[in-house]
Image (tube, grey):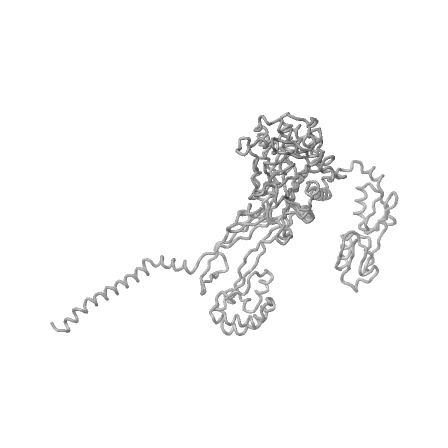
Amino acid sequence: MSKQQKLIRRVYPIYMLLILFGLGILFKIGQVQFIEGDHWQELAKSYSTKHRKIDAIRGNIYASDGSLIATSVPKYEVRFDLNAEAITNELFAKHIDSLCLELSLLLPEKAKNEWKSELTQARKNGARYHLIRRKLSYTQIKKMRQFPIFSRGKYKGGFISIQQNKREKPFQVLASRTIGYSRDNSKPVGLEGAYNKILSGTQGLQLMQKIAGGIWMPIEDENEIEPEDGSDIITTIDINIQDVAENALLEQLIKQDADHGCVVLMEVATGEVKAIANLNKTKNGGYWETYNYAVGESTEPGSTFKLASLIAALEDGYIDLDDSVETGNGMYKFYDQKMYDSRIGGYGKITIKRAFEVSSNIAVARTINENYRNNPQKFIDRLYKMNLHQKLGIEIYGEGEPRIKSANDPTWSGISLPWISHGYEVSLTPLQILAFYNAVANDGKMVKPRFVKEIRKIGKPIKIFGPEVINPAICSKATIEKAKAMLEGVVQQGTATNLKNANFKIAGKTGTAQIYNAKTGYKNDKQVSYQASFVGYFPANKPMYSCIVVVNAPSKNVYYGNLVAGPIFKEIADKVYATSIQLHEEIKNTAQFAERTPIPVSKNGNRYDLNKVYSELKVPSLQNGENATWVAASAGRDKVTLYKRVFKVGIIPNFIGMDLKDAIYIIENMGLKADFTGKGIIKEQTPNAGTKVENFDRVKLILT
C-alpha cells in the first residue's frame, strides 16, 4: 500500500467525523429554530423584558369634617432617551443649547454649560435612559414637557416620565401614630396598616425592557393593566379637638419634664374616638409621636382601677355607698406588706363613697379583701364579666394585652386580692380603661372604640361603620347610678376639686401609680417613678364625651393625677364644651332673657340679615327713615335703631363697623379686590371713605 493510500485511510475517518459533526450542528440548528424556537424566544425575552408592577394611587385618609390628614402626593422621575431614532444629529445640535438653558432655569443646581456637557457625553455613550432628576413635582413636569426636544414626546423627543406616589401628612404630628404607615418588611402601624388593602387599591402592570447598563426602561407609555386606585377612609378624628389635645399634652409634658404621655377623647354613645395624642421625649429633649401608648402600653393603672373593684362589690351586694370602713392612721398591713394612704394620719372611719372620693387605698383594699378573701375567684369572675380581661379588638394593630390573673394563677398570693383592688398586679392600656369608664357613662353599655366612620370610593360611601357593642350591660342600672355618684363626688368634693367647672359638671377618677421596672422593681436608684392619670366623662348629668389622660414619669416632684393629668383633661373638656352647641342647655324663655339682658351691639350690615337676627332674639328694631339694603345699627336701652347707609357710584364707601362678609360683597360688586387682616369688625380701611374708585383696584381692611 502506497503512502498516499495510507494517508487517505487515516484521514478518511476524520472527514467522516467532521461530516457527522456538521450534520449534527445542522440538525440542532433546525431543532432550535423550528421545533424549540418558541421556547427559546420566550426565555430570551424573559431576560430582556419583564412586567413591572404599577402601584395604584393610595386612597386618602380624612378627618371627620373632611380635612385631609394623609394623602399620596405624586412625584416624578424624568429620564432622557438621547438615542431615540427620531433625535437626529441635526435636531440635537439645533436644540441642545435651548434645552439646557431651560433645564438650568428650572433646575438651577447645574448651569447651562454643565447640562450641555452632561447630555452631550451621554448621547456619545449611547444612553437610552439617562436620569435628569428624581422627586419632581407635577408643575415641574408640566413645564418640562414644553422644553425643546422634550416637547416632541417619548418616541420623537426621548422624554420619559415615571410617576411615583409619596405619602404625606398635611397636619404632620397630629395623630401621626394613629394614622400610621404601611411599609414593606415592617409591621403595619395605625390606620394605614389596618386598612392597607382598602387604601392600596389594585396594582397594574407595565412592560419594561432591559437596556445597556442593566437599566429597565418602559417599552410603552400605556400600561398593559391599569391600576385601580384605592378607596378613601373617613376617620372619627376631629382636627380641632385633636389639636387642642396635643397642645395641652405637650405643654404639660414639658412643664413636668415627663417621659411620655397620651390622651384619648371618645364619644360616649358611639365609641367614636375624636382625638388621640401620644407624645414621648426624644434624644434631643423635644417631644414627638413615635409610639401609640394609648393603644399599646399595658401598665398597672393604680387608683383608676378602684371603680371596677367597688362596682364588683356593689353588684355582688356586699356593700353600699353609705357603709363605713376603718382606714386607721393611714397605714395597714396585709400579712407582711404595708399599704399606705396618701394622707398622713389617715382618714379614720369613712363611708365607701367618701373612700372613693379621697382615693383611700386602705379602704378599698380592706373592703375587697374582707368580702372576697374566702372566694377570691368570685371577685375575679366579676371583673371578667365586665370584659376587663379581654382586648377591645380595635382595628389598629398592636393593642396591648390586658392582664387580670385568676386566683389559680401560680403568682397568686395572700396580698394579691388587696393589691389588685387598687390597681396593682393587673395591667390595662389607657384605651381599655377608657372603654370601661365610657361604659359607666353609657349606662352600662360597653362599646368598642372606633376610629373609622366610613369607606368611600370616588366620593361615594361603600361602607358605613356604626357602634359595635362589646357588652350590653357590665352591671345593673342601680350599680351604674351609684358608680356615677362616686365619680361626680371625686370632682365635687374629692381628689379632683381643681377640675370643677361653673358651666358643666365633670365626673371622673384620679390615678397615681408607681411604675414597676422588671429589673429594679418600683424603685430605681432609690427613686420612685410615677404614672399620673385622670379618666372620666362630661357633662356628668348627660354624658357625651369620655376622656383619659396618662402622663408617665413626671420628674418635677409633682405626680398626683389631679395636678399632672387633670389640667389636660380640663382644657380639652372646656374646648369641647365651648365648641359643641349640643352641650349647652337651651334657653327656656327667650323673652324673659331679653328683658333681663342689655340690647346686644351689632355690626353694621345688611338690613334683612339684622332684622332676622333681632326677630329671633325678640329684640325690637326700628328703621329710621326709608328702608335700605345696607344699614348702621345703633343699640338703645330698649330697642335697636337701623340707619340707612348711602353708597355712591364710583366712591369708596365707609366700611368701618361692618362685618367682613358684607364688606367683601360690596367691594367685589364694585369691581375691586379685598385684602384683610385680623378678626371681628372692620376698624380701619385703605383707601378712606369718599375716595374715587378709579384710582384704586383693591381695598385693604383691618379687623379687630
Q: Residue furthest left?
A: 1
Task: Using the rendered view, name the quadrant where residue 34 is placed.
Answer: bottom left
The location of residue 573, given as percent across then percent down, is: 71, 42
Can residue 464 be seen here? The reply is no
Q: Could you tell me which residue is drawn at 54 percent across and 67 percent down?
A: 150
Q: Could you tell me which residue is drawn at 16 percent across and 69 percent down?
A: 9
Query: Quadrant location of the N terminus?
Result: bottom left
The location of residue 566, given as percent across then percent down, is: 70, 41
The location of residue 535, given as percent across then percent down, is: 66, 39
Task: Using the rendered view, name the quadrant where residue 578 is placed.
Answer: top right
Q: Nearer the viewer, residue 363 or 330?
A: 330
* Vertical position of residue 66 compared to residue 315: above or below: below
* Vertical position of residue 136 compared to residue 60: above or below: below
Q: Nearer the viewer, residue 598 or 326?
A: 326
The location of residue 126, given as percent across then percent down, is: 47, 69
Can residue 308 be seen here? The reply is yes
- What is the count of numbered marks? 0
Q: Nearer the viewer, residue 693 or 257?
A: 257
Answer with left or right where residue 128 lies relative to residue 671.
left
